[in-house]
Amino acid sequence: MLWRDFIRNIGSGVGINLVGSTLKKEVDDSTVASATSDAAGLISFETNGHPGPVYHVETTGGQTKRRSSKAFGTVFPSEVPYALMAFPDGVTKGVDNELQAFGDSSGMQVKVKTGLALVKGHLYRCVTQQTIPVTANSSGNPRIDRVILRLTRPGQTEEGKFECLVLAGTPAGSPVAPTLTQSAATWEVSLAQVAVANGAATITSGNVTDERSYLQVADVDDVQTLSNKTLTSPTINTPTISGGAWTGGTDLAVADGGTGASSAAAARPNLGAAPASAKYVVQTADAELSAEQALGALATGLVKNTTATGVLSIAAQGTDYWAPGGTDVAVADGGTGASSAAAARTNLGLVIGTDVPPVASPTFTGQVSLSPHVAASGSAPTASIGAAAGAGATLDSISGNDTFCRVTLTTGGSGVTTGTLFTITWAGTRADANYGVWIAPKNTAARSSGAIATMGASGQNTTSCPVAIGITLATGTQYVFGIFAFDV
């Protein structure tokens, strides 16, 4: 007998050369033959006779792949499972003993007869009856297990592994069968359920409930086309009616998927719908309804409901609601009863000069003084550049007055250092030299703690105030200073 398969790179699909492999029996893992893949990745095994279900395992690129004849047949064609996925999962009817699971009171075990199944395009073949152990149950509650076929799907470490085993459930007062795994990695189908009582010592035939689903593939000879035929007392399982009508018989009951009636009017109450004589509000009149109110019959406008009767009508402006450009809203209704300010004041008893005194506009002259602490008035001060601003520094602008002013200065291209950046000369002479100055530079680099001082050991007087810097500013950079002087 000859077995062949390809050893390929999973990512590229290219065959892998010189991969050693051993063909072993599924039943006892004994070695049948050994071989090495060729340059195309083809590996071939030859034996005398047929050893039954076999598998071979290869390890390449850190991954171990397992291929089984139970999953792929005896020739291992990689594309066959994908073609067979067009068919549903199920046991093949009529092949051997159809993988029947049963208990025979021989102990804590179930047995599975020979047969063939198709699961996700992979063939499982059981050529000799299998005995599968059932885990003992001493939990204090009954348990339901399942006899399953489990396929390890392509792309997994043991892809192609196909086995029959018992999947244990969870003990409970009212146990349920364990959930089957059906994922991209693993696919399970059930052959039977096994009831495992607490303390059970054996599995009987009555403990096993068949759950097999069969592969339904119709034979051409089983299909017949009926034309103008009469069927006497036929039994039709899960019929589908399409392309025609159910005629000549009793109305199909609601319980059977019908309406139990022969007209739409009679069907509605059977289906729990309101009868045609019920009162409806519809957009337009409907010939099947007899008591509806059609909104299309009303004039354009706002719809008003009538208490108790629920009859709808169009609301009247000035009676039911107020609208822009319509009747003035009366004082009694929260309005002014007028369309002008003068008329509204009259209606509200607010006539100027009669009901309320006139209000004259205030006139402000002179300066606003917050003396003795702050005086905001006068012309803008002047400023002169200090040595710390560097060579070529420019005083770009100065605005404000002797209380609030804004100075914009661009440092020179060299020679920028700490010390006096510029000196403010007030437009007017201050009362004395005892005043404070708060300076806030706009530029972030100049806002560091201790960067700005208003004076040195001396220099502040009644006419001017030096502005000094405690750090070296960047060259050729514009800085903006806000200066606020106040008496202390």
Image (cartoon, grey):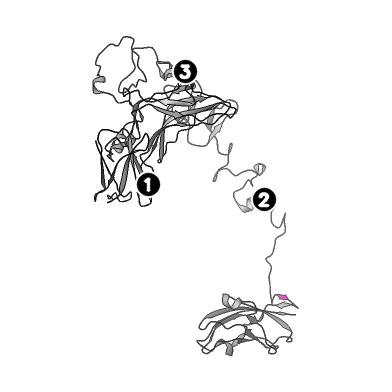
Query: Which element carries disc 3, helix, strand or loop?
Result: helix
The kind of secondary structure element at disc 2 is helix
Which comes sooner in the sequence, label 2 or label 1?
1
Amino acid type, label 3: Asn
Residue 358 is one of the magenta-drawn residues = yes
Q: In terms of image quadrants, where is residue 424?
A: bottom right
Q: Is residue 118 above or below residue 377?
A: above
**Majority SS type along the magenta span:** loop
Q: Which residues are magenta?
A: 349-372
Q: Residue at x 61, y 43 (%)?
A: 329
Residue 216: quadrant of the picture: top left
Amino acid type shown at disc 1: Thr
Q: Residues within 10 Å of mark 3 (few under 14, many from 20)?
A: some
Tell me the residue at 55%/36% (across/down): 316
Q: Which quarter of the figure is the C terminus placed in?
A: bottom right
Q: Which residue is mark 3?
A: 270
Which numbered circle lies on residue 346? 2
